Image (tube, rainbow, N blue to C red):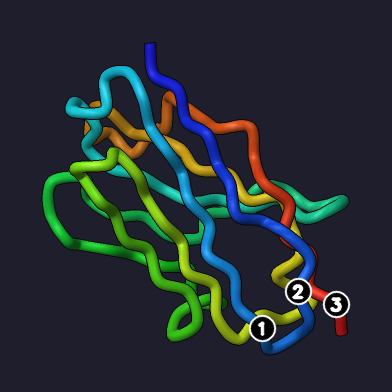
Amino acid sequence: QVQLVESGGGLVQAGGSLRLSCAASGRAFSFYRMGWFRQAPGKEREFVAAIIWSGSRTSYTDSVKGRFTISRDNAKNTVYLQLNSLKPEDTAVYYCAADTKGSGSYAYWGQGTQVTVSS
């Protein structure tokens, strides 16, 4: 069974930074891609960033390019999301997710961590 646990969220002023972590347990060796998503109040969940587990290829949604960086530490089975130059519109619950089949479908999800950016 795969478990994903996010941490690192919090309250930060606009322009500040946070680093989110997602610790994976279980069949982490079988992951193909790890992703970060977010959901703001009253809005649908949206894709933020993704990284190939066994490589370095990354992708980002346009609104975070140049500000957020996704990375992973395979030895620790952990994926990170560095959030810089935060804006109030980045306020959301951030979720990590795992795609184990390379299908683009994320079968496993964490419980989420709240990021709140004050203006």
Q: Residue at x 40, y 71 (%)?
A: 69
Is residue 56 toward the left or the right of residue 83 in the image? left
Q: Circle 2: is it few (<14), some (14-19), or many (20+) Cα within 10 Å?
A: some
Relative to 29, say whether 48 is above or below: below
Give the SS element for disc 2: strand
In the rendering, at what x and y percent does residue 17 appear?
Answer: 60, 78
Is residue 34 toward the left or the right of residue 64 in the image? left
Q: Residue at x 51, y 60 (%)?
A: 48
Image quadrant occupied by the C terminus: bottom right
What residue would you read off at disc 3? 118
**Quadrant location of residue 89?**
bottom right
What residue would you read off at disc 2? 12
Image quadrant occupied by the N terminus: top left
How much space separates mark 3 and mark 1, taking CA atoms?
A: 10 Å
Give the SS element for disc 3: strand
Do the numbered discs 3 and 2 sit on residues whose CB atoms are within 8 Å? yes
The kind of residue tagged 2 is Val
